[in-house]
Image (tube, rainbow, N blue to C red):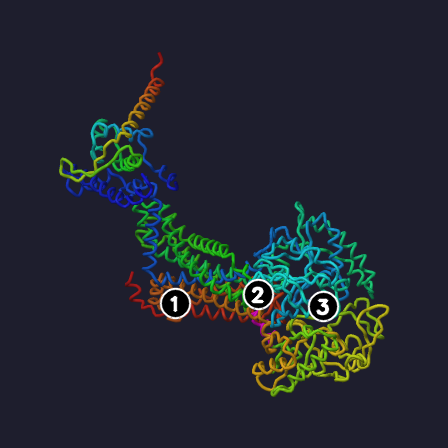
């Protein structure tokens, strides 16, 4: 019979069968009656002869293949009807799951983005990233928190000697540069890339061609640029006419040769690159005061490579390390080291080959632990939700033990009963899951944006794998549903029919109620752990907010500008900056204006080795102070107090004796005291030929200048006009609300030269808030999770207690009849709750101590064993428990003994 | 199918697999009849030697319906009762012949084995 026809006829067939069986029974009964049997008795005898009518009907129907589907639909309809009948139960269960699953879905989005997404390159699984350990002396480039492990000479050496390990090897390093497109000037993020970069990654151009080995030739000789897809769309409207056009990067003409595919914006996802230029063009776009292209002592690039077939990470590492050690030994004499300790640490080195699937591991290093913490929390919340649902279903199962018993007695097979319970559980789980995934989707994107900034959400590759997300949500929900059904399912497998039908209660109700209490205890313990974590992270946030920075962040505006686009010498740059500062200072509402070559609290720092006259470094001293080039009003504008000596004046400029201001940490380290530092001489660099020629004229108080959570280092400030800095961060102290002067500032800069960019104009408070944005988000989310967990646990406890009070009404009635006071009855409830809370906290404390250790990296000025957080969490838990217990306890106390005893 | 094992376990089996089916087919071959009549005929013709749980007939009938060996239609019986009468299809007739042959061969085999030694 054709499929559809059969489906169509199913309903009629079922009706036919029922009628047929009915007719059979009646005919039999009629026959018996005709033999003289009374009607009643004849009917009974007919039934006996027939067997179990329900079962036979079911078996007969099952002959038709589609019966299982039929059963399923029937169960589904029945489950839906049941759920509609008890909306309180349904809403609670769906809500509990939606919250649990929603939290997980959202966090999974983050997790996937940081840890699972792979690069849009061909065969990303064969890509590896290199990194190295070992001491170093020289210049390190840091962008935010990112570390660059290699110099260009190191790369060239590895490139020339790794053919048997890698089928391709490539380097890239970041830069920022003003770019003139048409009339507008904008500062863009760029990547210097080696000639084999695109070939190694296996990337094809959208139009034109990409950078090739020939482009990476003699320094400065190939001014070509590849645009990212999004920059092509944004700056050129996606027009193919962009090819062979000239754009000015740092006032230097570059020819556009091609466009990279959509979604590819370099290997560092946090700093998506808009333009790519050959590594050999670095001298033209100096990111640093001099070219680092050939310097052994400047680490500013990272290396990716493609494994040869048959190579594994381990084998590549084994093959490369002798090469790496030889390179380091060769390089050691180039460093004028001052200690054996340095030599040891320089040579004690290891080259790591790590998976490059997700791009350079920066995003993972920075956010991986945070996301894992969140994931762990979300899983705990899901666990609580799951236990909660199990408890609810179990409760329902116990209450309906009689119903199950009746069905079993009527011949429902065990499997049918199981299917019935499972259908209801899974239906609930999927309803909850559907709501949860929706919540997760809504929350996921803003979450990612909040945690990673715009970088994460601007690129199209992100959030493209929602299929994976749906699969995850489905699996999470189904598992939850199945697990939650387990206890209720066991009710169906051993129904003690006589007892169930007689007493109307499950025979082992007591053991079930014990199981529910255990579940509840588990929930409270889990929520306690989450609360401890939330409090630890909240205290971290508080400490980050209140830690003294050494600058006055209020009434402070900041922006960055770049005078390179105007061309000209370092002297000209200093003059331009002087004019910019003057122009702003003369506006109303401005109290002072300072600028520096390295931004404050941007995460950036420049460290350098120095030689201090009369100072012999100890063998274990390899400190390299931070250095910054600042204007004379820099300290006033930022509110950094002078400790001794003087700050710079207009007379400290190019051509006059070199001077420096240091911070008190520097003074104490090298001279033991701030006063003693005045008049001392030092110079940058180490070893013979370095003659101290910079005089220390002042000492200022140390400030946290890199990041809020980083202790200040020894620091040196050099007059901006005695440096060759060309990029400047400008700090404007205002008299009134700083945000009110934005327009004024833009106007003032524009008056000096319309080509000067004003990038990132905003208040210092915003900058700081941005700096601690991810700890803040972590704290907020963990508070959310903690409270959610406490709420879920309280709901669970409330449910269990109310139910157990109903069950014990008779017992309470008897107790009261025998003279127990209301308080003793309340005590009865409270004793149960007390035991439960103590057990929960006893379980929770060791678990939270473990969690604390796991969290250590995320904490700031808080011990991982923080008694305050433990106490706080205990108090919140107790509060939630007391609230949850209050209503059932009161209800128990108001039991009327007469009624309670009569009701039975 | 999921239910297979559960069904097999509790299916009341007569004599040998297929015996009930064979008898039903044979009865229907002589004349179309409804379920109750089938039960009566089996009992009478076997001189009450075969006692079937009456209901167990129906799953077998459904199986035969599904296999296309019989078809069924609602009729009014001689006693003015609405009954569902089954009749053999041509396919069912063919099936009956085959099964009969197999049954007779089997019976012959068994009686040879059971026959007293000569």
Q: State the residue position of label 1.
A: A888
* 1 or 2: tag closer to the N-terminus: 2
| Horizontal arrangement in the rendering, residue A456 relative to residue A619 (left or right) | left
A722 lies above or below A115 = below
Q: Quadrant of residue A892?
A: bottom left
Q: State the residue position of label 2.
A: A236
| Horizontal arrangement in the rendering, residue B93 relative to residue A337 (left or right) | left
Chain assignment, label 1 = A
Chain assignment, label 2 = A
| Quarter of the rendering occupied by the C terminus of chain A | bottom left
- Find the magenta span and give its range: A535-545
Q: State the residue position of label 3.
A: A286
Tag in front: 1 or 2: 2
Characterize the magenta stretch by its predominant secondary structure: helix
What is the crowding at mark 3: few (fewer than 14 residues within 10 Å), some, or many (at least 20)? some
Q: CA distance from mark 1 to mark 2?
A: 69 Å
Q: CA distance from mark 3 to mark 1?
A: 73 Å
What is the crowding at mark 2: few (fewer than 14 residues within 10 Å), some, or many (at least 20)? some
Residue at the image position 29 percent from the left and 44 percent from the top: A10
x, y (%) of residue B100?
Answer: 30, 24
Q: CA distance from mark 2 to mark 3?
A: 26 Å
Q: Quadrant of residue A814?
A: bottom left
Chain assignment, label 3 = A
Tell which residue pokes out farthest to the top in this image: B118
x, y (%) of residue A17?
Answer: 25, 42
Instruction: Report helix, strand or loop for mark 3.
Output: loop
């Amino acid at each position: 019979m054709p499929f559809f026809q059969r489906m169509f006829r199913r309903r009629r067939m079922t009706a036919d069968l029922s009628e047929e069986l009915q007719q059979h029974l009646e005919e039999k009964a009629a026959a018996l009656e005709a033999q003289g049997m009374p009607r009643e008795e004849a009917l009974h005898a007919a039934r006996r002869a027939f067997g179990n009518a329900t079962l036979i009907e079911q078996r007969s129907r099952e002959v038709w293949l589609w019966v299982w589907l039929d059963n399923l639909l029937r169960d589904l309809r029945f489950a839906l009807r049941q759920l509609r009948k008890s909306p309180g139960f349904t809403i609670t269960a769906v809500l509990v799951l939606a919250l649990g699953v929603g939290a997980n879905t959202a966090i999974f989005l983050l997790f996937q983005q940081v840890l699972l997404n792979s690069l849009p390159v061909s065969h990303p699984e064969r890509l590896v990233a290199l990194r190295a350990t070992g001491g170093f002396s020289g210049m390190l480039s840091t962008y935010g928190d990112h570390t660059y492990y290699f110099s260009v000479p190191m790369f060239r050496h590895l490139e020339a000697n790794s053919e048997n390990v890698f089928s391709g090897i490539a380097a890239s390093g970041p830069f920022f540069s003003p770019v003139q497109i048409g009339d507008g000037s904008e500062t863009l993020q760029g990547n210097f890339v080696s000639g084999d970069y695109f070939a190694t990654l296996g990337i094809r151009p959208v139009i034109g061609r990409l950078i090739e080995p020939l482009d990476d030739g003699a320094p400065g000789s190939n001014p070509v640029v590849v645009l990212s897809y999004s920059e092509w769309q944004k700056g050129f409207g996606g027009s193919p006419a962009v090819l062979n056009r000239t754009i000015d990067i740092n006032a230097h003409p570059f020819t556009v040769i091609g466009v990279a595919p959509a979604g590819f914006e370099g290997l560092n996802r946090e700093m998506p690159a808009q333009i790519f230029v050959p590594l050999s063009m670095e001298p033209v776009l100096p990111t640093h005061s001099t070219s680092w292209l050939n310097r052994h002592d400047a680490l500013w690039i990272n290396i990716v490579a493609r494994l040869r077939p048959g190579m594994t990470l381990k084998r590549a590492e084994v093959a490369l390390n002798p090469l790496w050690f030889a390179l380091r030994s060769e390089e050691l004499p180039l460093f004028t080291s001052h200690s054996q300790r340095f030599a040891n640490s320089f040579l004690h080195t290891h080259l790591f080959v790590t998976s490059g699937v997700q791009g350079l591991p920066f995003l993972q290093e920075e956010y991986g632990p945070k996301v894992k913490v969140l994931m762990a929390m979300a899983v705990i919340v899901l666990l609580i939700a799951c236990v909660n649902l199990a408890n609810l279903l179990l409760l329902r199962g116990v209450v309906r033990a009689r119903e199950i018993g009746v069905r079993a007695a009527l011949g429902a097979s065990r499997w049918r009963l199981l299917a019935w319970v499972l259908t209801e559980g899974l239906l609930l789980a999927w309803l909850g899951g559907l709501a949860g995934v929706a919540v997760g989707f809504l929350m996921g994107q803003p979450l990612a944006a909040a945690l990673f900034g715009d970088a994460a959400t601007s690129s199209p590759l992100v959030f493209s794998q929602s299929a994976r997300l749906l699969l995850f949500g489905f699996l999470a929900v189904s598992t939850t549903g199945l697990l939650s059904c387990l206890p209720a399912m066991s009710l169906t497998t051993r129904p003690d029919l006589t007892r169930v039908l007689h007493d109307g209660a499950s025979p082992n109700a007591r053991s079930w109620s014990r199981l529910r209490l255990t579940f509840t205890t588990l929930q409270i313990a889990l929520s306690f752990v989450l609360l401890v974590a939330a409090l630890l992270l909240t205290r971290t946030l508080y400490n980050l907010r209140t830690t003294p920075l050494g600058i006055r962040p209020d009434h402070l505006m900041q922006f960055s500008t770049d005078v390179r686009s105007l061309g000209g010498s370092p002297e000209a740059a200093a003059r331009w900056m002087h004019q910019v500062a003057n122009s702003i200072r003369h506006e109303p509402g401005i109290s002072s204006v300072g600028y520096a070559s390295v931004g404050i609290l941007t995460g950036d720092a420049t460290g350098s080795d120095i030689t201090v006259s009369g100072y012999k470094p100890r063998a274990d001293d390899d400190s390299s102070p931070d250095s910054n080039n600042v204007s004379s009003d820099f300290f006033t504008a930022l509110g950094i107090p002078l400790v001794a000596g003087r700050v710079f004046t207009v007379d400290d400029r190019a051509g006059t004796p070199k001077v420096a201001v240091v911070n008190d940490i520097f003074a104490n380290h090298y001279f033991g005291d701030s006063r003693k530092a005045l008049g001392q001489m030092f110079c940058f660099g180490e070893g013979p030929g370095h003659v101290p020629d910079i005089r220390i004229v002042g000492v200022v108080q140390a400030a946290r200048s890199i990041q809020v959570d980083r202790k200040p280092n020894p620091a040196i400030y050099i007059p901006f006009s005695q440096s060759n800095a060309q990029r400047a961060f400008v700090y404007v102290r205002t008299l009134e609300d700083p945000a009110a002067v934005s327009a004024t500032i833009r106007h003032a800069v524009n008056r000096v030269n319309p080509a000067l960019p004003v990038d990132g104009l905003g208040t210092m408070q915003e900058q700081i808030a941005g700096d601690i944005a991810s700890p803040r988000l972590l704290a907020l989310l963990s508070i959310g999770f903690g409270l959610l967990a406490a709420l879920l646990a309280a709901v669970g406890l409330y449910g269990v207690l109310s139910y157990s009070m109903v069950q014990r009404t008779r017992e309470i009635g008897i107790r009261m009849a025998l003279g127990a006071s209301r308080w003793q009855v309340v005590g009865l409830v409270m004793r149960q709750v007390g035991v439960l809370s103590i057990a929960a906290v006893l379980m929770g404390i060791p678990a939270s101590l473990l969690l604390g250790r796991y969290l250590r990296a995320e904490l700031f000025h808080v011990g991982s064993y923080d008694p305050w957080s433990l106490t706080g969490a205990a108090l919140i838990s107790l509060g939630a428990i007391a609230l949850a217990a209050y209503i059932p306890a009161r209800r128990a106390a108001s039991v009327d003994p007469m009624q309670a005893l009569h009701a039975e | 199918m999921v239910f297979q094992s559960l069904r097999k376990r509790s299916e009341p089996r007569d004599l040998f697999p297929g015996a009930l089916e064979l008898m039903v087919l044979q009865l229907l071959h002589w004349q179309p009849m409804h379920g109750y009549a089938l039960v009566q005929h089996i009992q009478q013709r076997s001189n009450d030697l075969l006692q079937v749980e009456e209901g167990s007939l129906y799953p077998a009938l459904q199986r035969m319906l599904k296999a296309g060996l019989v078809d069924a239609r609602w009729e009014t019986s001689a006693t003015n009762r609405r009954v569902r009468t089954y009749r053999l299809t041509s396919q069912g007739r063919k099936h009956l012949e085959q099964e009969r042959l197999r049954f007779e061969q089997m019976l012959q085999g068994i009686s040879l084995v059971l026959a007293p030694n000569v």
